[in-house]
Image: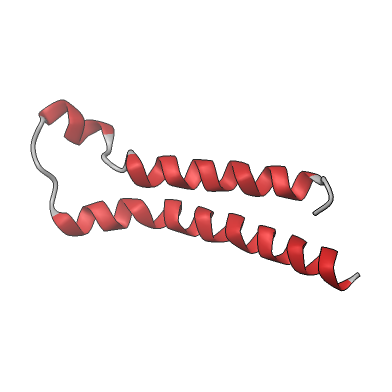
Amino acid sequence: MSFNFGIIFAVVCLIGGLLMIIFCKPFWWLMKKSEMPGHYKWYLRIPGILLMLFGIGIIIISAINDFMF
């Protein structure tokens, strides 16, 4: 694969999405030290999952572009 800024952006998206999934607790729940309901955890993980899918999509499109042309 050739070096391009799309791959760098995709890696940043993957790292950001992974961090968003890992650190999904909002600040006010961390301050109260109480357990948040399970469905809220998944609501807060959705942006991280979408960001990771976006990064994976960029890598796939870049790989297809390199192999096709």
The residue positioned 16% from the left and 56% from the top of the image is: 38
The residue positioned 26% from the left and 31% from the top of the image is: 27
Between residue 8 and residue 26, name the one nearer to us: 8
| Residue 37 position in % (x across, y down) | 13, 52
Outermost residue, top direction?
31
The residue positioned 18% from the left and 35% from the top of the image is: 29
| Residue 44 position in % (x across, y down) | 32, 51
**Coloring basis for residues:** secondary structure
| Quadrant of the snapshot with the N terminus | bottom right
Outermost residue, left direction?
34
| Quadrant of the snapshot with the C terminus | bottom right
Q: In the picture, residue 67 is in which quadrant?
A: bottom right
Query: Is 46 above or below relative to 4?
Result: below
| Residue 58 position in % (x across, y down) | 68, 59
| Residue 22 position in % (x across, y down) | 34, 42
The residue positioned 30% from the left and 57% from the top of the image is: 43
Drawn side of residue 22 relative to residue 64, left or right? left
Give the total of numbered labels: 0
Q: In the picture, residue 68 is in which quadrant?
A: bottom right
Outermost residue, right direction?
69
Drawn side of residue 66 relative to residue 36, left or right? right
Query: Is 52 above or below relative to 35?
Result: below
Drawn side of residue 46 relative to residue 60, left or right? left
Between residue 30 and residue 67, name the one nearer to us: 67
